[in-house]
């Protein structure tokens, strides 16, 4: 994923917001808060990745997945290509979220064990 000039302009603002969230989680709950924040981000990213092709059905709506499959079959080639490119961009963003999540989990729980436990 290449960075556009607008991405480079917005990067410091995104990093500042991310740093504020990390600092807030640390001030509220210490290193354990960072670990829990990492787990939360990882859970949300994984759930979005599971549902990337449409909503996941449950026992109340068993025909939902079949209807989504039929709708995808009726798409034109251009619509299918657009869907694939949107899915590819989504997965790239989710990869970044998973890496950030893993970093928070390792940093938070690792420093908690290192500094808080006797």
Image (cartoon, rainbow, N blue to C red):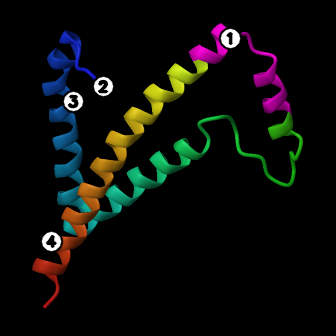
| Residue 88 shown left or right of residue 22 in the figure | right
| Residue 114 shown left or right of residue 6 in the figure | left
Q: Which residue is mark 4?
A: 111
Residue 54: image quadrant is: top right
Above or below 58: residue 109: below
Q: Of label 4 and label 3, which has the lower sequence position?
A: 3
Q: How far apart are the two marked residues, 1 and 2, measured between alpha carbons?
A: 24 Å
Which residue: 30% across, 25% down? 1
Above or below 33: residue 47: above
Above or below 11: residue 66: below
Residue 14: numbered disc: 3
- Label 1 close to label 3 by CB (< 8 Å): no
Which residue: 15% across, 15% down? 9
Relative depth, front residue between 59 and 53: 53
Q: How far apart are the two marked residues, 4 and 1, measured between alpha carbons?
A: 51 Å
User: The magenta stretch spans which residues?
Assistant: 67-82
Relative depth, front residue between 73 and 58: 73
Residue 36: image quadrant is: bottom left
Q: Residues within 10 Å of mark 4 (few under 14, many from 20)?
A: some
Q: Which residue is mark 2?
A: 1
Q: How far apart are the two marked residues, 4 and 3, measured between alpha carbons?
A: 24 Å
Q: How far apart are the two marked residues, 3 and 2, measured between alpha carbons?
A: 17 Å
Residue 80 is inside the magenta segment: yes
Circle nearer the viewer, 2 or 4: 2
Q: Residues within 10 Å of mark 1 (few under 14, many from 20)?
A: few
Q: Of label 3 and label 2, which has the lower sequence position?
A: 2
Residue 77: numbered disc: 1
- Label 3 close to label 2 by CB (< 8 Å): no
Circle nearer the viewer, 3 or 2: 2
Residue 105: image quadrant is: bottom left
């Amino acid at each position: 994923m290449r960075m556009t000039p607008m991405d480079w302009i917005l990067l410091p603002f995104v990093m500042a917001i991310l740093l504020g969230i990390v600092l807030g989680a640390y001030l509220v709950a210490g290193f354990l808060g960072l670990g829990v924040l990492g787990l939360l981000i990882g859970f949300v990213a994984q759930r979005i990745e599971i549902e990337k092709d449409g909503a996941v059905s449950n026992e109340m709506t068993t025909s939902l997945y079949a209807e989504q499959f039929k709708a995808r079959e009726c798409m034109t080639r251009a619509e299918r290509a657009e869907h694939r490119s949107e899915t590819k961009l989504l997965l790239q963003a989710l990869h970044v979220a998973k890496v950030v999540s893993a970093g928070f989990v390792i940093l938070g729980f690792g420093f908690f064990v290192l500094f808080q436990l006797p």
